[in-house]
Image (spheres, helix red, strand yellow):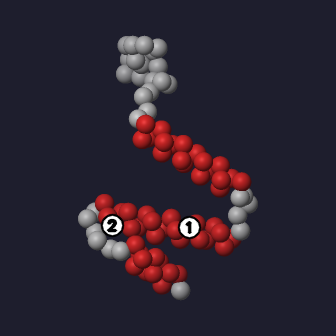
Amino acid sequence: MNSGENSENGSMRDLYISEHNAALLERVTRKKQELDKRRPLTQGELERLQEDFLVDFTYNSNAIEGGVSEFGKNRTLSRLQRT
């Protein structure tokens, strides 16, 4: 048996997904469907989504690295950098 197979059906297509991951996948799928319904997005909506993503990404990256910055401060810094 090669590394891409399991003994039950010969493939990895039936991998176990935890309840937590299944719920998360369902939530992401619903959000993607909601976003698709709102397309095409205006330029202002695209800019707001990009800013939100960058602020969230920066905050979470800092937290992973042990930083203690506040979420609101990240948003303020992001806005100041654009002006």
Check the image and report above or below for 48 versus 60: below
User: Residue 62 bears which disc, if any?
Assistant: 2
The residue most toward the left is 66
- Residue found 39% across the figure and 67% down from its top: 59
Determine whether label 1 and label 2 are within 8 Å by CB. no
Residues 27 and 64: in front is: 27
Residues 57 and 21: in front is: 21
Q: In the image, residue 43 lies at what x, y percent?
A: 69, 71
**Residue type, numbered disc 1:** Gln
Point out the tag, 1 or 2, that comes first from the N-terminus. 1
- Can see residue 81? no
Q: In the image, residue 12 lies at what x, y percent?
A: 45, 24
Q: Secondary structure at mark 2?
A: helix
In the rendered structure, the answer to whether residue 42 lies left or right of residue 16 reads right
Q: In the rendered image, which quarter is residue 7 located in?
A: top left
Give the crowd class for mark 1: few <14, some 14-19, many >=20 residues within 10 Å: few
In the rendered structure, the answer to whether residue 49 lies left or right of residue 78 reads right
- Residue found 66% across the figure and 73% down from its top: 44
- Can see residue 9? yes
Q: In the rendered image, which quarter is residue 69 located in?
A: bottom left
Quarter holding the N terminus?
A: top left
- Residue found 41% across the figure and 22% down from its top: 4
Residue bearing the label numbered 1: 50
Q: Secondary structure at mark 1?
A: helix
In the rendered structure, the answer to whether residue 79 lies left or right of residue 71 reads right
